[in-house]
């Protein structure tokens, strides 16, 4: 039963942290001038590209920090 509690806590941490990072990435991308990169940034395709960029950056940043946390926690097995 204890193992399932740990898995649930890890999942909750991952979801919460991902949403937090998504908000930060979305806020940061608002300063990006899409008019210089995309012909029609307000179109459906332009907005979808913006969303996909935000999700991709969120995945990269979240994976980095959660992997760092995991490796830092595994350091206790070194000694």
Image: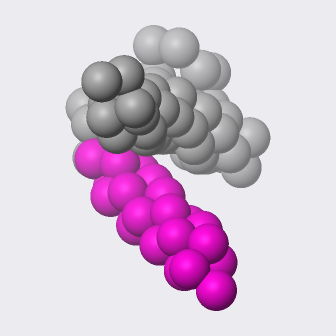
Q: Residue furthest bottom?
A: 1
Is the N terminus in the top left, top right, bottom left or bottom right quadrant?
bottom right
Q: Main secondary structure of the magenta part?
A: helix
Q: Position of residue 30 (x, y in %)?
A: 31, 40
Q: Quadrant of residue 49?
A: top right
* Residue 13 is covered by the magenta coloring: yes
Q: Position of residue 35 (x, y in %)?
A: 46, 23
Q: Which region is colored magenta? A: 1-25
Residue 5 or residue 67, whichever sits in front = 5
Q: Is residue 33 at all visible to an observer of this figure? A: no
Is the C terminus in the top left, top right, bottom left or bottom right quadrant?
top left
Give me the residue at 65% from left, 39% from top: 52
Q: In the displayed structure, does residue 31 sit left or right of residue 54?
A: left
Above-or-below relation of 39 to 5? above
Above-or-below relation of 4 to 47? below
Residue 68 or residue 58, whichever sits in front = 68
Q: Position of residue 34 (x, y in %)?
A: 45, 25
Residue 12 or residue 26, whichever sits in front = 12
Q: Is residue 17 at all visible to an observer of this figure? A: yes
Above-or-below relation of 65 to 38? below
Q: Quadrant of residue 17?
A: bottom left
Q: Quadrant of residue 18?
A: bottom left
Give me the residue at 31% from left, 34% from top: 76
């Amino acid at each position: 039963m204890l193992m399932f509690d740990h898995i649930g806590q890890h999942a909750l941490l991952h979801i919460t942290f991902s949403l937090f990072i998504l908000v930060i990435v979305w806020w940061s991308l608002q300063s990006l001038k899409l008019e210089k990169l995309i012909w029609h940034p307000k179109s459906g395709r332009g907005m979808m590209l913006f969303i996909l960029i935000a999700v991709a950056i969120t995945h990269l940043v979240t994976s980095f920090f959660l992997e760092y946390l995991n490796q830092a926690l595994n350091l206790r097995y070194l000694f």
